[in-house]
Image: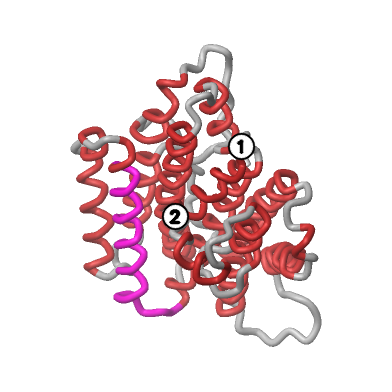
Amino acid sequence: MLSRIAESLFWIGRYVERAEDTARLIDVNLQLRVEDPTTDPTASARSLLSVMGVQTDEHTSPADVLPMLMHDPAAPTSIVSAIAGARESARRARETLSVEMWESINTTHNSVQRGQLKRLRLPAACTYVRERSTVIAGTADNTMVQDEGWQFLVLGRCIERVDMSARLVTLAATSPTQKSAWSNVLRACGAHHAFLRTYGAMTTDQKAAEFLLLDRLFPRSLVYTLNQAEKALASLDQREHRIGQSGDASRLLGRERAGLEFRDPDDVLMALPERMTQLQQACSTASAAVAERYFEGSTAALWQGGEW
């Protein structure tokens, strides 16, 4: 497969997931502010920007933060920028995408460019982004041949999901009202019903963190997503390896998955923000390793996102 096509598919997966998970982060932040009116709006806004990797200063206004993350085309961390990045990547790989896949991405991009998000209230806009991202991902899974190109798309989606889920977990772990935060993160991840089926009505920080980090059956948990990323990498490298892993990305993601999966569940909340920062750094390094191995010679993509 041409490195240009492989890279474009990888970034489609990342950009679509980035748009969806940014909407999830905004939704959680909104819910926390509604449920705890005593929360300092400035501190809440700066906390959200910090989780997103955006540098702030004393002139940052709380009223500007959510519109910036949602609508600002000049902000590399905004949903609008992520959707535009996905559409540009899709244009570069147009001959590989199914017609339905291209139409899903292009329709979403055109709708956003015409101001669809600005016409909706923020909670409804977050829901719209999540629904359109799900449509794009589902269309890809059901209309694309599951060959190398599809594996690159899945790999990009998984790496981005791990990174952004780590940010969601950090937001919950650092919230002053942690019990409410964990419940809202479960809802934002679409995990609340699955969590109740697994643990019953007792929503504790410990159980919520266990579910989002360690559950092997829930598709947005960190362990499940890291497993999917490892499988995609294994499919892309069919050579037989009698010793170790074949690439830096596989080693990095496998090490992080094992560090979560084989950790004592009773210690899941211990130093959680620091561990999530380490996981984000591993995702960044793994992404660079994938680019170096598979995309060398193609036009380098500009990362549209905050600092890792």
Q: Earlier in the sequence, mark 2 or mark 1?
A: 2
Q: Which residue is most to the top?
A: 59
- Quarter in which the C terminus is drawn: top right
Q: Is residue 285 visible?
A: no
Mark identifier at residue 175 = 1
Residue 100 at x, y percent in the picture: 23, 67
Say left or right for 298 vs 128. right
Amino acid residing under circle 1: Ser
- Who's the residue at 37% across and 35% down the image? 70
Query: Which residues, given as a range, are shown in magenta?
Result: 125-147
Residue 34 at x, y percent in the picture: 43, 33
- Who's the residue at 57% across and 23% down the image? 43
Quadrant of the rendered image containing residue 13: bottom left
Instruction: Name the secondary structure under disc 2.
Output: helix
Residue in front for this viewpoint, 41 or 298: 41
- For the residues carrying marks 2 and 1, which lies nearer the camera in this image? 1
Say left or right for 269 vs 71. right
Q: Which residue is most to the front?
A: 201
Residue 57 at x, y percent in the picture: 58, 17
- Who's the residue at 48% across and 67% down the image? 194
Residue 244 vertical position relative to residue 185 in the rendered view, above or below: below
How crowded is the residue under tag 2: few (<14 C-alpha within 10 Å), some, or many (20+)? many
- The residue indicated by pointer 2 is 17
